[in-house]
Image: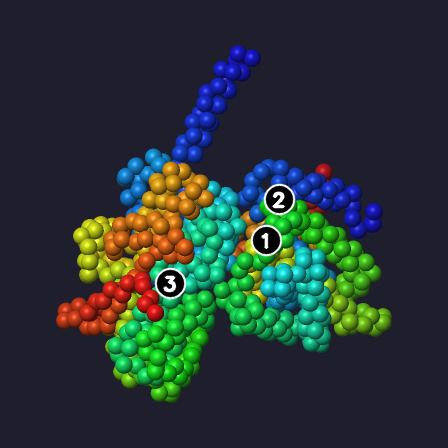
Amino acid sequence: MTDAMTRSAMAGCLISLALLISVPLFQSAYLIDVVTEILIYALFALSLNVIIGYSGNVSFGHAAYFAIGGYTNAILLTSHGWALVPSFVTSILVTMIAAGFVAYFCTRLTNIYFAMLTLAFSMLVWAIAFKWRSVTGGDDGFVGIRVPEIINNRAHFYYFTLIMVTAATTLLWFICHSAFGRTLVAVRENATRAGFVGVNTRLMRWWAFVVAGTFAGIAGAIFGMFHRGMYVESAFWTQSATVLIMTLLGGMFSFFGPAIGAATLFILERITNEYTEYWPTVLGCILLVILLFLPDGLAGLARKVRSYVAGSN
Amino acid sequence: MLRLIRTTGPIVTILAALSIAQAAEVKIGTLYPITGGGAIYGSPAMIGHRMAIDELNSQGGILGMQVVSVERDTKLNPATAAAAAKEMITKDGVNVIIGGLSSAVGLAISEVAKQEKVIYIATIPKTIQMTTNRRHDYVFRTASHTDFEGDAIAQIAKQLGAQKICDIQLDYAYGHDLADGIERGLKRHLPDAKKVLDLRPKLRATDYNVFITQIMGAGCDVVTSGLWGPHFVDFAKQASPFGLFQQIKYITGGEIGSQEIAGAMGEDYPDNVWANSYELWYHHSTQEHKNFQEALAKRLDTIETPMWPVLALIGVRMYGAAAEKAGSLDAASISDALKGMSIDTPVGPRTIDPETHQADTGQFWGPMVKKEGVPYRVMDPITYIPAKIIE
C-alpha cells in the first residue's frame, strides 16, 4: 500500500467495488442501466481531471475525445464489421493520436487561450461528425451500433463496463500517483519554478492532455456500445461543459472526486427530469453553489466535515 | 408464531392486492418534444395522446385493464429521446412506446425498441428508412412517409408547371429522405424539370439569410421544401422582406398547412405557398371527424383546433386495437396483430401494410389563401392525395 492511499480509502474502494459487482443481483434493468451510465461518466470525469486537477488547465473541449472514441469504435464495429478487441483498441489509439495532435497546439498556450483552443478543436470534431453524414450519420446520429454477442446482454455489458472502468481507473490512479503525476502537480502549482528545476513543463502538459484524451476515448467507446448509438451532441460544447461541472462538483483536488461528481450530477438530472423540464436551471444553480460555496467540491466538503468531526472529538 | 401471522397477514394481502392492481394496467409510454422549438407540434400531439387514453379508458381500457400514460419530453434531441425511451421501458415498465417528433428522434427510439423488444408506433417521424432498411419486427408507423410526401410535392409542381426547382431541406434524415422522395417524384411526374439548387440548413437553424439570397439568385420558379414548424416560421419571416414569395412559388411538406402554423403566423403567413396537413379543423371529411373536432375544441376551449392531436390519437387507437386482437400484451403477438391491422380514424380508415409496417396515410394538400374576415390563412381548395405511388 502506498502512503497516498489510507487503509480507510482502500476499504472504501473495496466496499464500492463489492457493491458494484452485486448490482445485477438486484435484477433491476433500470438499476443496471443507471449504474452502467454512471460508471461511464465517472471515467469521463476522472479523465478530464488529469488536465484540470493535476496539470492545472481548464479544457472546454474534452467531449471531442469522448466522441472520437465513440464514433471510431462504432464505425469499426458496425460499418467495417471488426471484432470487439481490435475495434476497441484501435479506437483508443485513434483517440490518443487525435489528443496528441490537438495537445501539440494547445499546450503552446496557457490559461484562457488554452481553454478557447480546446473549445475550437472540439467544435471542429463536432462539425466533422455533423457534416460527414455518410460515415457518422450526421444529425441523425450513428444509430444501431453492432455489439458483439458476448456482451449483447444487459448484465454482461454491465460487467464488461465495470471491468473496463475499474481497470482504467486503476491505471489512472497509478499514473496520477506516479512521479509523472507529482510532477504535474508541481507544474500546476508553479510552472516557472518547475521549469527552473529542469521539468519540461510543456511536454508534461502534453502528456497530461494525451492521457486525459485517451481515457475519455475509452469512456466514449463504451458509451456508444451501451446506447447502441453515437450522436453529434456527444461532441458538442455542452457535453464538455457537463463533464467539467461533474469534475468541479466532485472536487478537482481529489482523485475520486470527479467520479462522485459524475454520479451525483447524473442522478440529480434523472430525478429532476422526472418532475420538471427545467434541468438547465437546476444545473445553473448547482454551478453557482459550487463556485460560491464549494470550491473544492463534494470531496472537499467531506474532508472539511471529517476534520470538523475529528476536531470536536 | 400466530401473532406473527396475524401481524404480517394483512400486510401481505395488501401488498398482493397492490401488485395485482399494478399489474392490471397497460402502460403506454409517449415521447414528444414539449419544450423548445419542437413544442409547437409536440404539445398539441400530447393533447391528442391524452384524449386517446381517456377514450380507451371510457371504453373499458385494453383487455379490461386501465390504460396509464407515461410521458417524457424529447427536447427534439435523439440522444435524449433514446435515453428516455430506455428509462420508460426499464424503470416504468411501459408496454409500448408511441410518438416521436423528427425523423432522427424516431430512428433513435426505434433502435431502443428493437433492442428491448418493445413495440414502437411512430406517429409523426416520416423518414422512409424506418419502414425500409431500418425496419424491424417492433416498429410500425401511422404517419405518412417521405416518399409519399415527395411524390405529392412533385404532383403539385407539375400542376404549377415548374421548370427550374430550388430545393431546401433540413440537414437530417427527414430532409435528405424527402429530397430523395421529391427527386423520384419529379422523375415520374415532371421529368423535364431541372433542379438548380440544393440547400441544407441545420435542424434547429434560426438564420436563413444566406439560403434566401442563394434562392433569390438561382433563377428557380418553384421552391420545394420540408422546413417544418419553427423552421418555416423563421424562414418565411426572413424571406418575405426580400419578396421571395412574390417571385417564386413555394411547395412545402412538413404540415405547414396545419392550424398550428397558419394560426401562429396569422398575417405574416406568406403568399404563394402550397402546403399539406394531416387534418384541418374546418374540413369535415367524415362525421367522425366532426365529432372528434368538436370534442377537441371543447377540451381546448377553441374552435380552431390544432392538427397534431389526431396523429397521436391514431397511434394509441392502433395499439389498443392490436392488443385487443392479439388478446395479450406480449410484444411479439401485438407485432403480428399490427401487421395488416385496420382501424377507423377521424380522417378516414387506416391500414398497416404487413410487409412494410407502414399505414396508408395520405394528406390534404392545397394553396394557403386569405379569406375575408379570417385572421389567418386557410387551405383552399383542399385536395386529398392518398398514400399511393403510381409508377
Q: Nearer the viewer, residue B351 or B92?
A: B351
**What is the secondary structure assignment of the residue under circle 2?**
helix
Whether callout 2 and callout 3 share a subunit is answered no
Q: Is residue B143 left or right of residue A40?
A: left
**What is the secondary structure assignment of the residue under circle 3?**
loop
Residue A195 is at least partly visible in this image:
yes
Reading the image, the residue beneath label 1 is: A226
- For image coordinates 35% across by 79% down, the residue present is B191
Residue A302's spot in the image, x, y percent? 66, 47
Q: Nearer the viewer, residue B39 or A221?
A: A221
Q: Which image quadrant is residue B95 in?
A: top left
Query: Label 2: how many residues lie within 10 Å, few (<14), some (14-19) or many (20+)?
Result: some
Contact check, label 3 and label 1, Cβ < 8 Å = no
As drawn, A16 above or below A40:
above
Query: Label 1: how many residues lie within 10 Å, few (<14), some (14-19) or many (20+)?
Result: many
**Chain letter for mark 1:** A
What's the distance in space between the residues labelled 3 and 1, CA to CA?
30 Å
What's the distance in space between the residues labelled 1 and 2, CA to CA?
12 Å
